[in-house]
Amino acid sequence: MLEKIKNSLKNTYAACIIRKLRDELKFARRRYRKTPAGFLFYGHKQMETGNFEKEETAVFTKLFSSAEVFVDVGANIGYFTCLACQKGLKVFSFEPINDNLKYLYENLRKNGWQKQVEVFPMGVSDKPDLVEIFGEGTGASLLEGWAGVSSLMKQTISVSSLDFLLGDRLAGKKAVIKMDVEGAEYQALCGAGKLLGLSPRPMWLVEITLAEHRQGAKNPNFQATFELFWKHGYEAYSIGSSPCHITREKLVDYLNTGNNIGFETNFLFIDPKIDGMELVKC
């Protein structure tokens, strides 16, 4: 049994290395494509053709129409960063993985947006630290074992909190904050108390999963993540094919019975004065 586990880890690690080499070759031969949104982009076919996370893209487009600033936590190769730039927003992008940063930088340069975006080549957590991140590319996570990634595929990165880095810079601004950090969102939000309490309230779009990518385990901070937003006076809405208003009662029912109607993986948290259902309807 032990030998099988070792071989499995080695095979996963080898697959990561092969994928990395393949991506290097593709990057060297890159050709940019004009997206339906009007900007040049390279690195992901669905992003290039406007078929990436259509519901989320539609919601972001609505949010950007009334915003001044976009904070992209887990920017990856820059699709939503570029979408915000196209709409004229000031952008702060956080991305710790070097391979992703390479694509992000080139996508910004190709569109002439170098001075519109501040890129933080680091991760986000509850406090400054040096931590290990596992995996490469789009699925890298601070959680060991996330999505079955080999624990051998890791690197050390710097992390800090949103409050420490941006707490005073968003004061009085109409901000949209995206958080897609592969299972580490609760820790990141614990370091964003000042931002959660800003006026006007930022509009947050956060990926939160209960069991997905957790190898049979469940997210121990699933409800606590929602409670952080409710504590600061936000309303929660799911984004996807069956969007709905997420109440505490609905959340508890989901956890107790497994009734996941309306529960997707991306959620919008906004001021109660805003019509959330109008924003999440596509």
Image (tube, rainbow, N blue to C red):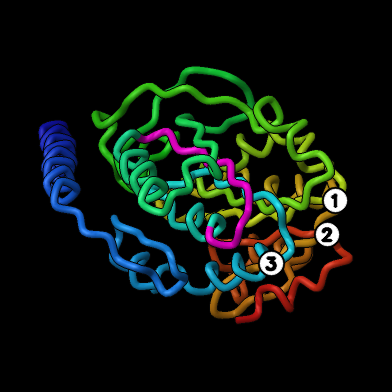
Quadrant position of residue 224 = top right
**What segment carries the magenta color?**
86-97
Q: CA distance from mark 3 to mark 1?
A: 16 Å
The amino acid beneath tag 3 is Ser
Q: Is residue 229 above or below residue 241?
A: above
Tell me how many marks there are.
Answer: 3
Q: Nearer the viewer, mark 2 or mark 1?
A: 1
Q: Which mark is residue 271?
A: 2
Nearest to viewer (mark 3 / mark 1): 3
Q: Is disc 2 placed on a helix, strand or loop? A: loop
Label of residue 63 in the image? none
Neighbour tally class for label 2: few under 14, some 14-19, many 20 plus, Cα within 10 Å: some
Tag 2 and tag 1, C-beta contact below 8 Å: yes
Q: Which residue is mark 1?
A: 200
- Residue sitting at x 81%, y 51%: 201
Q: Does the image show residue 132?
A: yes
Is residue 92 located in the magenta-colored stretch of the structure? Answer: yes
* Residue 128 vertical position relative to residue 2 in the rendered view, above or below: above
Q: Are marks 2 and 3 in contact (CB under 8 Å)?
A: no
Distance, label 2 to label 1, CA atoms, is 8 Å
Q: Which residue is mark 3?
A: 65
Please, what is the three-letter code of the amino acid marked with disc 2?
Asp
Name the residue: 62% across, 74% down. Answer: 262
Circle 1 residues within 10 Å: few <14, some 14–19, many ≥20? some
Residue 171 horizontal/vertical position (percent): 81, 39
Measured as percent of width and height from the top left, residue 110 is found at 36, 51
Say which residue appears at 87% left-offset and 46% top-offset: 199
